[in-house]
Image: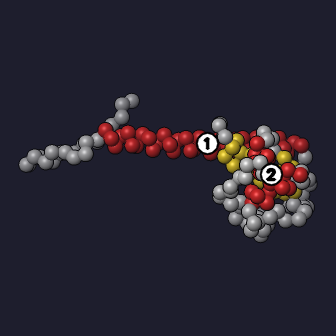
Amino acid sequence: PDPSPSLAGGATERCEVVMGGPLAEVLRGVRPVFGDSTAARAALPELLGDARRVPDGHRTILAPLRGRRRVIGAAVFVRRPERPAFENDDLLVAAQLATHTALGVDKAVLYGREVYIADELQRTMLPDSLPQPTGVRLASRYLPAA
């Protein structure tokens, strides 16, 4: 219920991934990794930034978010010290959550791009201006075909 103060606010919105760095290596992997693994311990500070860190005793899983064509981010699952440690089954759940999340974000971005293209196409089909004959008011609109 109470987020840890050192993790409050989540990770940085944008993180520059250093090619060949520890975070790049984890993101290149297909599967989530336990936070106590060597790779995750090195990657978490790069992902979370200088202002945030995982408190001592908390258990973590670091999962790459892979869209259709590329890695679009990472998810960090955190468990308090009084909770049981993560198990291999938790890695499977984290992988499924990360996959569904990444595909959802990927679809949302694709949908937004398609909406923008459709709006621009509709605007180009409308006339820039209409003639202004005396005694007549003209209007135009675009109605897409079914």
Residue 75, image x and y in percent? 74, 51
Residue at far left of view:
134
User: Badge 1: few (under 14), some or many (20 or more) residues near its Cα, within 10 Å?
Assistant: some
The answer to which of 137 and 62 lies nearer the viewer is 62
**Which residue is painted at 75% across and 60% down in the image?**
48
Which residue carries the number 1 mark? 106
Quarter of image, res 108: top right
Quadrant holding the N terminus = bottom right
Mark 2 or mark 1, which has the lower sequence index? 2
**Which residue is painted at 68% across and 56% down in the image?**
15
Which residue carries the number 2 mark? 22
Q: Identify the colour scheme used.
A: secondary structure
Above/below status of 117 relative to 78:
above
Point out the frontmost of discs 2 and 1. 2
Quarter of image, res 116: top left
Kind of residue at badge 2: Pro
Whether residue 60 is visible, yes or no, is no
Quarter of image, res 118: top left
Residue 137, image x and y in percent? 15, 48
